[in-house]
Image (spheres, rainbow, N blue to C red):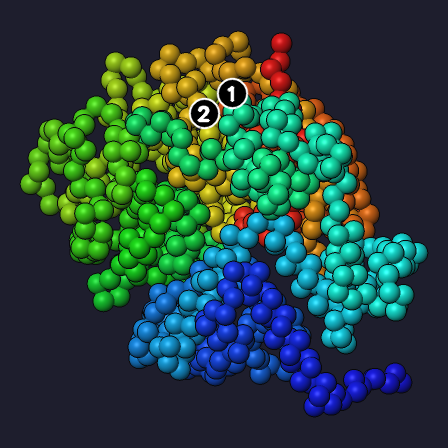
Amino acid sequence: MQCIRRQPKRSVSQENILREQSRRVAALNGIRLGLKDDKDLKFLLKGSQLLKVKSGSWRKERFYKLQEDCKTIWQESKKMLRSPESQIFSIEDIRDVRSGHKTEGMEKYAKDVPEYRCFSIIFKDQRKTLDLIASSEDDANHWISGLGKIIAHSNSMNQKQKLQHWIHTCLRKADKNKDNKMSLKELKSFLKEVNIEVNDYHAKKIFQHCDKSKTEALEDDEIEEFYKILTERKEIDNIFQKYSDEEGFMSCQNLVRFLHEMQQEEDAVVAAPALIQRYEPNERAKRGNAMTKDGFLMYLLSDDGNIFNSSHRKVYQDMTQPLSHYLVSSSHNTYLMEDQLTGPSSTEAYIRALTKGCRCVELDCWDGPNSEPVIYHGYTLTSKILFSDVIKAIKNYAFKTSPYPVIISLENHCSVEQQKVMAQHMMTILQDMLLVAPIDGNKSQFPSPEQLKGKILVKGKKLSRQEDPTGTNGNNNLEAEDVSDEDEAAEIEDESVKTEIQQKGKSDTLKLAKELSDTVVYCKSVHFNGFEDPSHPRAFYEMSSFTESKALKLAQESGTSFIHHNIRHLSRIYPAGWRTDSSNYNPIDLWNVGCQIVALNFQTAGTEMDVYQGRFQDNGFSGYVLKPEFLRDEQTKFNPKSITEGSWGTKKKLLLKIISGQQLPKVNKSKNSIVDPKVTVEIHGVQQDNNKKQTKVIENNGFNPKWDEEFTFDIEIPELALVRFVVEDFDMSTKNDFIGQYTLPFTSLKQGYRHIHLLTKNGDPYSSSTLFVYIDIQDCD
């Protein structure tokens, strides 16, 4: 039987010393965050009792406290056998902190408590929202304000500060006896903590080099020396040496030369002095208009050294073209948090989609109790939410990320009475946001996103004999009539759904209320009956929805016709009925024929969603991306399935070198598990451009792996291509584990030496995980 060794009990004086050390570490981290002597930070470090709310009957007191690293929150748990890690969550994982009753949980279970005592923590991943009640308004304000400040200040840290903060946190974690010294054993433990395997000989060599005092323990300046060795970037030192003098300064003139020769920056003469002022930490160098190695590294890690063109982070495209000339970020069955059959529906799903830049959301509407329409996936066991609650969420979050129009795609299954309630809710809740009349009397083509700023449009059925949306002909006195019922839920390939439909006896028509019909102005849903006859053109505002298989068939067989159709009309594409697990299809082939509203399941991470978010981070994350000229030209002969000579842009050759990686996260949280990273570079575009190449595997090093591998890609149609960088933990026996990725349009690539800031599986940025690459783009002859 193995004996469990007990930790010796500390004396009162030892406890006081540790408490004082902990206070000093917290104060230092507060200074790093720019929150020295901040009252809210001090309150959070002290901690407080909060009521955790889970349901109407579950409301329990728990203690919450900010850890000394100022990065993690410790929460008390009464569960048996709960691991210490599960009682901690990182502030980096918080998406939002909301005061009052601003979540479904608070709305349902805390209405008896004043709003000023309530707040909620919403997480980036699929973790459940934390609904909390403070004992007083002051306590609630300390938590809301304190967390808000930490998040804001953490986000504004430069990459070097983030790295320093992270390493010092790991050092503190490795210091098991909390004596502020590091033994050889603790150094080895630390290296595993930061995701690097070092053999005993190498670890001892580093240790002895730093142990100037020969005390068998590193402290103070010796730990700083160790930190410098660990964070050394030889690949960047080599670049810097080519452009610097013997004293270690890069003159402004040499920086101009570097920016021009290596980075392909057109305005290098103007940019160089500004970069020195922005990133150089050494005042002497700054005064001499020069850059040190530290300043050079800070520049390369900054937005200016990013692979993504920083000028594309704002809206730079022409936003005055007709709406049909843009790709529109669009979500399918937006209300669902998980799968299509049994998962929960939530207003939170709308908030997440809208804050991710989504501009077209879907509402499946059914009759609910008490004459209140509900939203859920018809014929399934997904939970139900009130239509009015969804409209409130859309109102509150529609324009927080982008000012450009939001389209509400209605799938209406309600009775005439509840349709009138839907129309009334939209009118009273959305008020002036809701578009109810044509813009500037435009009757021949769509208005532009610029003209529709701040407006919410409804896509749905329209009474055929009522005046058309642009206000020309027809009988305006009709109260209701039968229209075709396009029931996407009925397409689900599931036996229980088919049985439910048979029992209910589904009709092909639906009676439509005039009040709901009146909310549809520019997006009238019609059945697709083939591409139009030029002698009998369809009205521009008539739009059709296609299942992915139907749309892909049209793209394959009639690509050019589909492109022409999408110049004047909007097309909406949605996932096939067999995707009950909420998986996604590849949006690329449909964008390539100009389809605008290519709706994906935003709740499902994966390659398809990475590519989607990569496409829409362009043009200021506005949710609208202007289609290339050859997808807007009415004379176009472009067909992505059969590329012929034409004005589709200059062919390009992409030369790419994957140099190194920095601070890749652990995939397996086990202390002894170190990642074996490899990088795959993928091109997504027209069929001829689709390609992928991968690096070798670097064993046991996620901290600073070096690849130095070069790849070449030929790009036929650059305006339709996206580049995806994927980092995986190689596993010989099972599927590789995902570490991080980054996707961007080919046209947003910056040339030269660049850092790629990796994203998590859910598309959120890691704090300090990067790839360092070299990019060269050449015109093909």
Q: Is residue 337 above or below residue 1?
A: above
Pick the front one: 381 or 93: 93
> Which x, y percent locates residue 501?
38, 52
Q: Position of residue 404 (x, y in %)?
A: 32, 39
Q: List the residue tagged with mark 1.
A: 640
Query: What quarter of the picture does the C terminus occupy?
Result: top right
The residue nearer to you, when weighing 60 against 9, is: 9
- Report which quarter residue 712 is drawn in: top right
- The count of marks equals 2
- Amino acid type, callout 1: Pro
Residue 418 location (% of width, % of height): 21, 56
Which type of secondary structure does the marked residue at label 2 adopt? Answer: loop
Residue drawn at 51 percent across, 78 percent down: 47
In this rendering, would 23 be left or right of 59? right
Q: Who comes first in sequence, dot 1 or dot 2?
A: 2
- Whether residue 453 is visible, yes or no, is yes
Is 256 situated above or below 781? below
Residue in the foreground of this view, choosing between 304 and 291:
291
Q: Residue at x 31, y 79 (%)?
A: 112
Categorize mark 2 by other alpha carbons within 10 Å: few (<14), some (14-19), many (20+): many
The amino acid pointed to by label 2 is: Val
Seen in the picture, residue 477 relative to 207 is either above or below; the reply is: above
Which quadrant of the figure has residue 275?
top right
Residue on which the image places disc 2: 593
